[in-house]
Amino acid sequence: MFMPTSIANLGKDSGKTRPGRELPDDLDPQRLPQHVAVIMDGNGRWANHRGMPRIAGHRQGAKALKELVRCCKDWGVPALTAYAFSTENWRRPTEEVDFLMALFDKLLRRELKEMHREGVRISFVGDLSALAPSLQRTMENAMAQTADNTAVHFSVAVNYGSRSEMVNACRQVAAQVQSGELSLDEVTDEHIEQQLYTAGTVSPDLMIRTSGEQRLSNFLLWQLAYTELYFTDVFWPDFDRAAFADALRAFKGRDRRFGKAEDKVAASLTA
Ligand code: FPP
């Protein structure tokens, strides 16, 4: 089933270290991120440490992702974007690329019914036109079937690269200006945002990268402008509810100022 029994058995009183279906007591539902982005890194190393092939890490990573979607629903985090395949990932060995593409297709088909029943809206960001037509159809079907769901918006970045997303946006804006449809004054933050793959979604409040790497790797460069960044040494396949709770605790402790002065500094200036 969607939820491992070890998690299903955890109850409200399971404490901070073994969080279950309920939001851990020390987390405030009013201070949760509204959109979490994740760079799911460390699948290969997770497998390597166990003497397993890299693809075993991706398979386990997919289970961790599925569980995180459900956790977002249980705990009240309304949007999750996961970086599943970057424009640079095509450079990996063909067998690994083929495995990942087949895994996306298989999981989307297998989990669609369950996700739909859970109220998950599925969407994708990236240049999907480069993917196999059958995978594109699976994705379009998942998007269409779940389009009206409201419990969690689960967005998967596939063949995604932030720079090419921005180049596309620039081209669209340039063409609009060139045709006279748009004046230069109308080229604003908001207008550019509407040309991105993520148009219509709020920017992430929290970005999590696993496996100890501290880079953005061409992920949502525009959208992460004011996002809180959280890095953990946990390999992605081991990223469970307890690890997610730790990230949410770190987020809760952040003072988000969006470029403004700290409140006490502002008060001292006006005193
Ligand atoms: C990065 O770890 C992981 C990926 C490039 C693939 C992530 C994909 C999944 C978890 C499957 C998701 C499934 C769906 C349906 C979206 P890495 O291979 O770079 O690990 P390493 O840095 O240890 O080598």
Image: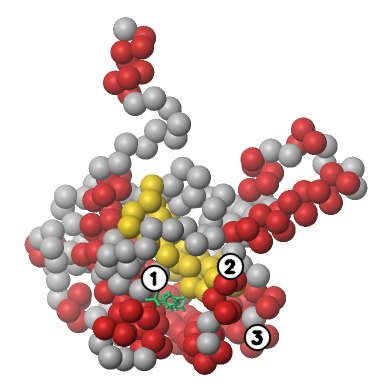
At a point 77% along the width and 33% down the height, the residue shown is 185
Mark 2 is on which residue type?
Tyr
Instruction: Identify the residue position indicated by label 2 in the image.
Output: 160
Q: Furthest-top residue in view? A: 271
Foreground mark, 3 or 1?
1
In contact (CB < 8 Å): disc 3 and disc 1:
no
134 to 18, vertically: above or below: below
x then y, percent, for residue 14: 10, 65
Q: Looking at mark 1, is its residue's CB closer than 8 Å to ligand 1? A: yes
Q: Are there few (<14), some (14-19), or many (20+) residues within 10 Å of tag 1? A: many
Q: Percent position (x, y) of residue 136?
A: 64, 80
Type of amino acid under label 3: Ala
SS label for mark 3: loop
Residue 117: x, y in percent?
42, 75
Q: CA distance from mark 3 to mark 2?
A: 15 Å
- Which residue in the structure is indicated by mark 1? 41
Tag shown at residue 29: none
Mark closest to the chain's N terminus, 3 or 1: 1
